[in-house]
Amino acid sequence: MKKKLISMILAASVAASAFAPAAMAEEESKVLTFAIASECETLDPSLCNYLKSSTVLMNVFMGLYMMDEDGVTLTNGCAESYEVSDDGLVYTFHLYDDVLWSDGSAVTAGDFEYAWKRTLNPETASTAANRLYAIKNAEAYNSGECEADEVGVTAEDDTTLVVELENPTAYFIEETAEVCYSPVKQSAVESSDNWSQEPENYVCNGAFVISEINPEESYVLVKNENYKYIDTIAIDETDIVFVDSTATLTALKNGEIDMTNNISTQAQSELGGTDQLLSFETLGTSYYDFNCENLTDARVRKALSLAIDRDTITQSIVSSKPESATGFVPSGLSYYDSEDDFRTVAGDLLTYDVETAQALVEEAVADGFDIDATYTFITQNDDELKTIAQAIQSMWKENLGINFEIVTYESGSYWDVFYAGDFDIAYDGWTGDYDDPSTMLECFALASCATQNRWSGELAEEYDQMLDDADAMTDQAERYALYVEAEELLIEESPILPLYFRKSQLLVGTNVTRAVNDNLGHTLFKYTILE
């Protein structure tokens, strides 16, 4: 039945080849079929705060700068060059004058100004808005405390974009490669309330154009003939199909898909160590959010974290066999002027310590914690995520005597439940956007916590102030030392439960001669090469 479903999806995708350039002979077309677990949370870059969505959007939009084919270094996107003022506060970007939208019109500096202010507009309600807070008055505008024209981004002319920052930000250029920094075309956005789900209204400027959206089945991406760097693209079309991880290995063997990031434990076991299972270093952490309005006692939250045997989970359940989390900031992020990374300098903050966990729960029970209640544990309807949840549920029952009921949701509805706060603990994860600990630690600024783990109070405010203070520091040694202290506070208060440090993988067919994931976990179709 699953094979039949995949075949039906692929048949629909083949039919979509009519969107390919007419001058291209069918037998010459290079079509990549890429499988993901389910459809994206959003296809609007201004709203994108999700890895699955940004993987698609990285391939259909292009910012001022973008990731090169090595997946690590930046290269020019829409910007030809930039200058920075002596005080590090003003960036002047010079755009190429030949970058076009997929409809053939010119991409201008004004498109960037419109897009960034749209993301920040409180009426847009973008969960990605805080990614732009380095810009002067960005947070104030997003909070309704100033007007749009006070935000520090101005198109001086069609090819000159001037950006003023709140504080010197050494990683700002890396931020401009994030999906939420992409331009969007105002007339396309205003053409329909549902423009990002309507291919006829979808205008983009990246390597591919979304030519077809088949709900719960597939997306069809065709090469953008107006893409500035079209000569670097080796494939003509990418058909993105939604396939459960249990079916992707069989589909790959049958030639029904060419590549997937949705990899089963069976595929990991069977193809691990071969050139068909590729691994890429990734700057990210999979974790769980506690709803701190429900689990108000930090001792209980920390106990739940200490009572998990992460190594058993990562080595026996998680297909990629990642490194167990010993803090929230993952391995691989640099530490200022040190040969060691941040994680090595900051040390291990998390261990498997049942005895300490039990003592913390006993203290909390004495102060009123209800150990006999049943708490709600939500996760997405994914085989691996469900198995992990069941293992954790068992550890908590055995080690602490605390009962959790697991409730699963399809990805389309999961985040609605999550942001509504209908949970006691919820699966989450974050992949950073640049090589600096702030890319991880800022996830738990008060503004973000309000709709996620709902952490509040004096210590949450102290943590938030640490982040603000670090942002304003020009002494890098002091800034990094403050981040170490902030992470220690985060782990002690435990509004979150880090599980493992992410690494990304691709399962590829024998016809794939090059596949690229960047260090943020995005698959870059534009650099794929097929035989």
Image (cartoon, rainbow, N blue to C red):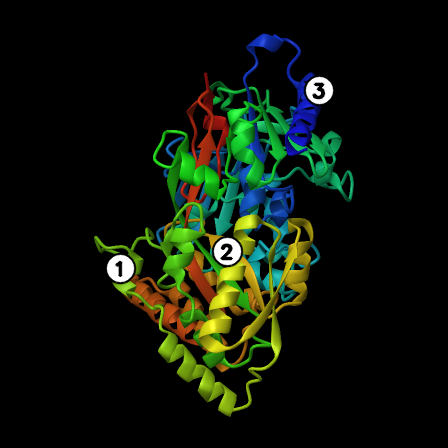
Return the residue found at the far left.
Answer: 339
Return the residue found at the far bottom.
Answer: 366
Q: Are marks 3 and 2 in contact (CB under 8 Å)?
A: no
Residue 338: x %, y % from top left: 22, 56
User: Crowdedness of circle 2 by 10 Å Cα count: few (<14), some, many (20+)?
Assistant: some
| Residue occupying image coordinates x 69% and y 22% | 11
Q: Is residue 393 above or below residue 260?
A: below
Relative placement, left or right, of 351 versus 444 is left
Mark positioned earlier in the residue sequence (3 or 2): 3
Residue 14: x %, y % from top left: 67, 20
**Three-letter code for the amino acid on which mark 2 is drawn:** Gly
Q: CA distance from mark 1 to mark 3?
A: 52 Å
Residue 429, labelled with which disc? 2
Residue 344, labelled with which disc? 1
Residue 365, labelled with which disc? none
Q: CA distance from mark 3 to mark 2?
A: 36 Å
User: Crowdedness of circle 1 by 10 Å Cα count: few (<14), some, many (20+)?
Assistant: some
Q: Secondary structure at mark 2?
A: strand
**Three-letter code for the amino acid on which mark 1 is drawn:** Thr
Location of the C terminus by quadrant is top left
Residue identifier under label 3: 15
Q: Is residue 18 visible?
A: yes
